[in-house]
Amino acid sequence: MAAPDKAPSLSPPPVDGEVLSTSRPQRLVALAHDAAEFTRVRGQLQGLTMAGHTITLVWLTGEPARELEFLALRRRVRPGLLRSPKALRQVVSTPRRHWRGDRTRLADAIRLDPATLKVVAAADGVMAFGERAKGAVKDVVEGRSVRVPHKELRGWAGLARVWDEFASVAQADGLSPDFAHELAERTAILKEPAPDAVQWMLNDFLTELTRSGHHEQALALLPLIRTEDEDPVEVARRRALLAYTRTSESGREDPDLRASVAELLTATDTVLAAGDVERAAALTTVALGLLFHVELHADKLSTPLIEEPETFLRDWQASEIARTLARPVPRTPPPEQNQPEQEHGHEPDHTRVIVLRGSYPQFSAQLIDALERRPDVDVTVHSWGRRGTTVKGLGVRPEPIEERLRQAVGEEPLDGELATTFGGADAIFIDWADRGALVALMHVPAGVHVTLRIHSMDALSPWLHLIDWSRVDDLVFVSDHLRDTVQRLLGERLAGTRLHVLPNTLDASRIPEGKSEGHRRRLLMIGWAQPVKDPAWALDVLGRLRAHDPQWRLTLVGPDFSPGTVTSGLAYMADFRERLTAEDVCGGVDFVGHTRDITPHLAAAGFVVSSSRRESFGLGLVEGAASGAVPVVRNWPIFASLDGARRLFPAAWVVDTVDEAVERILAHAEEESWSAGSARTRAAVAQRFVDGEPAVALSRIVLGEAQDSAI
């Protein structure tokens, strides 16, 4: 959404008056002497009908214009001879000066028209338009109805223009969350969805509002989405949008989410069969946005991708669009090099390696160092340049999906420059199975050795399912439970890829040799301010410990919570801050903030805590353990069914409950027990994560020198 220099605004909305209601449908009479008066107030009449009011036109002369066809209820005043006893009694009871009036005068004519009098008597209010009607309305409504004050008609014409104004702002790229608030304020009065002409713009607007975290505005506009349409594909798309918005707003899986995905995938297959690749890609983006919604997998205590992957992904895997996107595409031949290699800065006998550092580049630093220490290797760290926003990250975006789909149906990759860049390498290392990995693999030609490493959240992302795994020679996992997760999700698609499990590499320069005073009463967490890290669990542990000894403290190293846009994340942040003020932990937490120098904080801590809901490795925890801090590892709930933490670490490190965590810490709280536990911890870290020199081992895989290490 754009941020225009001057935010566009809509016409002021109508408000409740003494007669007119903005929330309760009413029966109204529009009164005029000549029908031409109605044309001048067409906008007001249309706005009233859009809000659910029923309007009957009543006039004496002329005929309503064609543009008033939306008003079907009409009554032309027809004064006539009164023959029925009831009508005669009415005339007799009416003052003589009135019933003997001029039939060409509006008030007199209406008194001589019983049918019109019935219409007036049944109305909740009468609106007078034109000077003659305004002069007559008092006599017309007397004893029968009430006059609508002219001031109460303000804003109704603007309501009639709301969709024209919306379309104009959308076409000028001026839509914004503030505009959405104004639009919702006005359209809350409307009783019908938005007209067909603006439905596609409104759908796109809601999608962008939801994606950018403005769930309240998106939810307010949801009733305007028309769920019925002649095009079943559009119906499926809108239904999916509703499920996406409701999931985003509530922080929970919408009851209609899975059914709407199934319907949308069927529609997408129809579009794909018709050859409309662009639309099929756009629909696939919506479907994957639902299946891999951040509220379903990222920060929860469980995820269907672990607990029930076959059931959860059944409709996706059965769809033609998924099969097409999973279809292997042979690599293109390597491009011809028009210049000698040494002119490109490479020695002719050196191995040329390109490294793509992925969504979180810090994890590849030790590998790059290991490669650069090799005298026969030239390393280039790839920069995405102009593509950066579309390829960096794990969130669902349409551009990589369309590019992958076009390749899968037989079109060549669009970026010749990228193919040439990767074609100039002997080996490529891709960290994280993210958007960048997908795009890079599409452009890597034959003859280039490809290694990809998966960390954690990328295993639960859509890109895992779109990558052409036939193009990956070696796939590296940082833990056994992560490997098991990916193998279960991808199955036979990994048949031609060698699999390896290698731990993340520790930076020895960050690890202190000894401990500072007071370490046996200090807990440490490195990287904490996300729901997935669940620091509130660590606060519960701290609170229990301080009940034994108020000297216990917790140090939280890393940035604070970011404002974010995820509903459950915002709720978690608020709950954490409230928990922080509780008496049992208040004043016992030290915040360090972002720092590159964790050595003094490692030295100050006698215990290191992993309270996470999900981890594939837990580098901060292992760094703490390497420093001699006694580890306390929560049995990560998302991976508990795979026994993830206990397979990665010594069983003694892992606890299932807060009580067990407190028990483990107190068992090591005194000098003798702590020293023994610290020594065992250092030895375990060395054996499991250091002695094998994982960075060197990974560099050998990247260079194609460790094919026998595959599992």
Image (cartoon, rainbow, N blue to C red):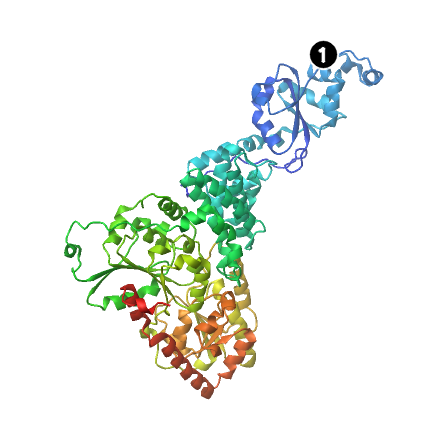
Camera-side residue of 611 and 636: 636
Residue at numbered disc 1: 103
**Quadrant of residue 493 in the image?**
bottom left
| Residue kind at label 1, given as amino acid type | Arg
Asked which quadrant contains residue 85, the reply is top right
Give the total of numbered labels.
1
Q: In which quarter of the image is residue 591?
A: bottom left
Observer-nearest of 170 and 149: 170
Secondary structure under tag 1 reads loop
Q: Is residue 492 left or right of residue 34?
A: left
Q: Nearer the viewer, residue 692 or 117?
A: 692
- Position of residue 265 in the picture relative to residue 352 (left or right): right
Q: How far from the left and from the top, in percent, is residue 621?
A: 42, 72
Question: Where is residue 559 shown, x and y percent of the image?
Answer: 42, 64
Q: Could you tell me if residue 204 is visible in this image? A: no
Q: Where is residue 466 in the image (x, y as percent from the top left)?
A: 40, 52
Residue at the image position 55 percent from the left and 63 percent from the top: 575
Looking at the rendered image, the quarter that the C terminus falls into is bottom left
Q: Is residue 561 above or below residue 516?
A: above
Residue at image position (56%, 38%) is: 226
Horizontal and vertical percent position of residue 515:
39, 81
Judged left or right of residue 98, residue 575 is: left
